[in-house]
Amino acid sequence: NQSLTKRLTREEKLSKRFYCKLCNKTFSYHYYYLVHVPEHNGNTPHKCDVCGKGFVIKSMLKQHKQSHVTNRQFSCDVCGKSFKILNGLKIHQVVHSEDRPFKCEVCDKSFKIEGVLRTHMLRHKNIRRHICEICGKAFIDRSGLLKHKMTHNTEKGFTCSICGRDFKTKGCLDRHVKLHSGIKSHACDQCDKRFSERVLLKQHMLVHSGDKPFACEICGKAFRQRSCIPRHMRIHTGETPFPCKICPSMFKFSHHLRNHMKVHHKDIPQ
């Protein structure tokens, strides 16, 4: 509808990456960046009476205080799963429903949750100018195209002299060789851990800072790594990409499938 389109247009304009120069934290939306900045000068008037943590706006404090609630009073009448807040239960209940009321007006795909539709719609807004001349797939930037084109190259011209593993690029080989060398030149100044690559150190530092810069737009749960978001989204969408090859059971996560195999099919050779 028209209101959804207007909201998506506004979100598209804001869906850039905003960097805080004081702590290098990144934000998908300008609003969250503006809310974050006052934290550095202590301008957080809304304090949690349980742990003392401060927030710029009252709604963020209200959401945070739910983390201190130990009793889960809202239960699903289908599976019995319980939630701290009513909204959490409502989001969960769509998993049990086959209805997909939120339809994409561009490609006719339908979704159980409006937030998932909004995320999907942003894909249609992206202008993909970089086209692969081999298969026709389009990409937003040139780096995405170059990375994709490597999939068409079946030759792996860079071989590890230690284990014989082949790689398509020298960069991939160089990163792999560091694993054999044992050289970990990037040290954490908070603990004794060391890492072979700067990106691994940067990821590790989030453990000490407690920062979780990547948040689910549906329930607000935050993660240290962006790669955790797609996995988490299965809770909301009900997607079960891991089927059991022996029985009709399907699972959201690979470890659930592994546990299922150990319990129910442990006597069957894998």
Image (cartoon, rainbow, N blue to C red):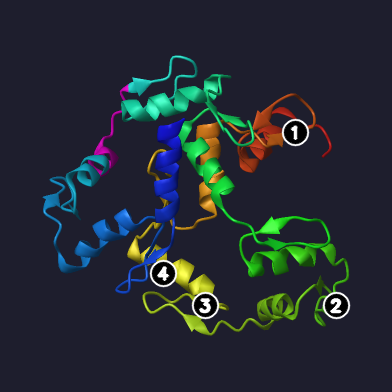
User: Dot 3: within a 10 Å radius of its alpha carbon, few (fewer than 14), some, or many (20 or more) residues?
Assistant: some
Residue at disc 2, secondary structure: loop
Q: Which residue is mark 2?
A: 157
- Label 2, label 1: how many angstroms apart (C-alpha)? 42 Å
Front one among 90 and 205: 90
Q: Earlier in the sequence, mark 3 or mark 1?
A: 3
Q: Which residue is mark 1?
A: 266
Front one among 35 and 47: 35
Q: Amino acid at mark 4?
A: Met
Q: Position of residue 189 (x, y in %)?
A: 38, 79
User: Dot 1: within a 10 Å radius of its alpha carbon, few (fewer than 14), some, or many (20 or more) residues?
Assistant: few
Q: Amino acid at mark 2?
A: Gly
Would residue 82 be seen by someone viewing this image from the given angle? no
Q: Position of residue 195 (x, y in %)?
A: 53, 76
Q: Is residue 267 left or right of residue 191?
A: right
Q: Earlier in the sequence, mark 4 or mark 2?
A: 2
Q: Which residue is mark 3?
A: 198
Read off the magenta span.
64-73
Tell whether label 1 touches label 3 (CB within 8 Å): no
Q: Earlier in the sequence, mark 2 or mark 1?
A: 2
Q: Does residue 106 sit above or below 177 in this rendering?
A: above
Residue at disc 1, secondary structure: loop
Q: Does residue 111 sit above or below 163 in this rendering?
A: above
Q: Position of residue 1 (x, y in %)?
A: 46, 30
Q: What's the residue at 62%, 65% (across, down)?
A: 141
